[in-house]
Image (tube, rainbow, N blue to C red):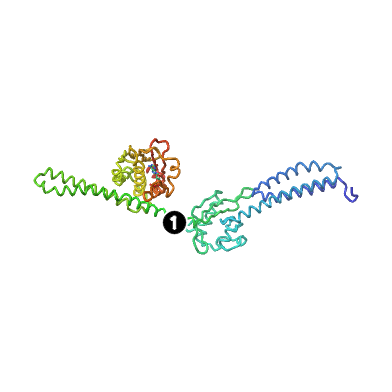
């Protein structure tokens, strides 16, 4: 052993002090890091705690221990620490990369609304560097005062009141429709604000994740307007399909009127016969007027999705007028076993469109069967008003079933089907919080629509 070294016991004591000091420092540093709670930091802290209480105290009192062994122990600890620190550092770099690579805005503000951390996505949106934000507030960054502090008259809560709400309540806030201004234009964000805490579990700021959904919202609007257009197109297509039958349907009562009118002069002196002819004319006029009324209503635009309370049974009855001609033409009786009052919240024009489509599909589906019928029924359950459109067909093959609601899927001949009926019906029903499905456990083909009961919706509202 080297002569210049102090006595062995002294070396161990010094080493012990140095080791404890070193471990103490590293622990302090890591405690600070621990609030981010990477598992690696936790592992190091546990390892250090073991070393502090266990390994070294075992070594220290052994006065005749060889100094080189103590140095080896030090080196080993340093090596472990280095590896762990490198691991923490690389995990941190990865985390930073993830945070900076997303176009979403990520930031941390302190309790005085000063930025502590900002990701690249946020900085780039404001044409700044992340470091430009540090220590600044939203007002320093040029956000309009009313967006920052709020404006009750305009219904704007404001960034800061919301931040304060998060930091004082300690609860996360989700803002579905959070406005911000970028380059003078208002953008809408989906924002999550969460409290950030230190290792003592004290809230020291707010962490924000904000996603710009302006483009998404305008896409949704376009989709809605496209949906409206396709609903109108499908309606026009059904009107086209129905028009020939309806013309025929109007012609019949017209012929009755014509015949009765030409016979009237003969019955001038026979009041009974005269009355009966007048009644026949009246019935035929009513029939024509019911058909025209139904057509007018059906062709009315369903632009507004305003829902109001309607009796589903009345809507079914009105739809029956419209498919009556096709029911007769195909010798397929369509019967309705209606309930007295089945109240739903709906746009009746749109629901009529769905029903006409289902009934026409059913009539078409059984036209080659020897036994032809279509039955519509309404059943009330606790939660729903259930409407069934059943036909004498024996169900739908698996292959067609899986594609039923796909837009443009049709098994009809070119020019006979658009393939839009069921997909549009589903879209319309979605807007009504209703569902449509094909029952698979029915011996006959049967579609079921479930409407939420009007009373239930009213309770929610
Ligand atoms: P389209 O009637 O123009 O074909 P739909 O979307 O209304 O468009 O219907 C898609 C397909 O679903 C139809 O072509 C048909 O194959 C099938 N389908 C719909 N209703 C019935 C039914 N009641 N019975 C058998 N198949 C049906």
Q: Estimate the x, y position of residue 210 in percent, counting from the top left.
A: 54, 55
Mark 1 crowdedness (10 Å alpha carbons): few <14, some 14-19, many ≥20 = few
Q: Secondary structure at mark 1?
A: helix
Relative horizontal placement of residue 131, taking residue 222 as reference (left or right): right
Q: Residue furthest right?
A: 3
Residues 418 and 138: in front is 418
Residue 103 seen from this side: yes
Residue 304 seen from this side: no
Relative horizontal placement of residue 323, taking residue 398 as reference (left or right): left
Residues 49 and 238: in front is 238
Relative horizontal placement of residue 342, taking residue 150 as reference (left or right): left
Residue bearing the label numbered 1: 222
Q: Estimate the x, y position of residue 38 in percent, counting from the top left.
A: 65, 48
Q: Estimate the x, y position of residue 222 in percent, counting from the top left.
A: 44, 56
If the picture is divided into quarters, which one holds ligand 1? top left
Q: Estimate the x, y position of residue 430 in percent, counting from the top left.
A: 42, 47
Residues 442 and 129: in front is 442
Q: How many marks?
A: 1
Q: Residue furthest left?
A: 269
């Amino acid at each position: 052993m080297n002569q210049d070294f102090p006595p062995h016991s002294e070396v161990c004591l010094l080493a012990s002090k140095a080791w404890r000091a070193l471990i103490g420092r590293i622990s302090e540093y890591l405690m600070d890091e621990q609030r981010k709670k990477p598992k690696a930091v936790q592992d190091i802290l546990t390892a250090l705690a073991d070393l502090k209480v266990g390994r070294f105290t075992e070594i220290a009192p052994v006065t005749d221990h060889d100094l080189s062994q103590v140095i080896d122990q030090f080196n080993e600890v340093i090596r472990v620490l280095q590896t762990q620190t490198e691991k923490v550092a690389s995990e941190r770099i990865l985390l930073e990369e993830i945070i900076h690579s997303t176009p979403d805005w990520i930031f941390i503000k302190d309790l005085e609304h000063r930025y502590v951390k900002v990701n690249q996505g946020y900085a780039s949106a404001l044409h700044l560097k992340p470091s430009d934000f540090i220590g600044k507030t939203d007002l320093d960054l040029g956000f309009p005062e009313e967006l920052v502090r709020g404006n009750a008259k305009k219904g704007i809560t404001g960034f800061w009141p919301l931040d304060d709400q998060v930091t004082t309540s300690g609860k996360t806030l989700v803002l579905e429709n959070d406005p911000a201004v970028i380059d003078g234009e208002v953008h809408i964000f989906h924002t999550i604000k969460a409290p950030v805490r230190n290792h003592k579990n004290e809230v020291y700021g707010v962490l924000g994740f904000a996603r710009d959904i302006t483009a998404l919202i305008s896409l949704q609007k376009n989709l809605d307007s496209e949906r409206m257009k396709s609903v109108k197109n499908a309606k026009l297509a059904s009107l086209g399909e129905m028009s020939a039958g309806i013309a025929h349907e109007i012609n019949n009562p017209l012929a009755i009127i014509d015949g009765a009118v030409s016979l009237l002069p003969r019955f001038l002196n026979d009041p009974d016969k005269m009355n009966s002819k007048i009644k026949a004319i009246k019935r035929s006029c009513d029939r024509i007027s019911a058909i025209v009324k139904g057509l007018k209503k059906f062709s009315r635009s369903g632009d507004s999705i305003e829902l109001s309370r309607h009796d589903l049974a009345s809507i079914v009855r009105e739809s029956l007028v419209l498919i009556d001609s096709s029911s007769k033409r195909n010798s397929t009786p369509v019967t309705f076993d209606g309930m007295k009052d089945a109240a739903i919240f709906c746009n009746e024009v749109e629901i009529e469109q769905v029903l006409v489509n289902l009934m026409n599909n059913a009539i078409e589906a059984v036209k080659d069967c020897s036994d032809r019928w279509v039955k519509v029924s309404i059943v009330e359950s606790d939660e729903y008003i259930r409407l069934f459109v059943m036909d004498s067909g024996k169900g739908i093959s698996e292959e067609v079933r899986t594609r039923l609601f796909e837009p443009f899927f049709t098994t009809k001949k070119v020019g006979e089907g658009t393939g839009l009926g069921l997909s549009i019906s589903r879209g319309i029903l979605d807007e009504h919080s209703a569902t449509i499905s094909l029952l698979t456990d029915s011996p006959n083909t049967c579609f079921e629509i479930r409407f939420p009961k009007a009373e239930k919706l009213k309770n929610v509202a």
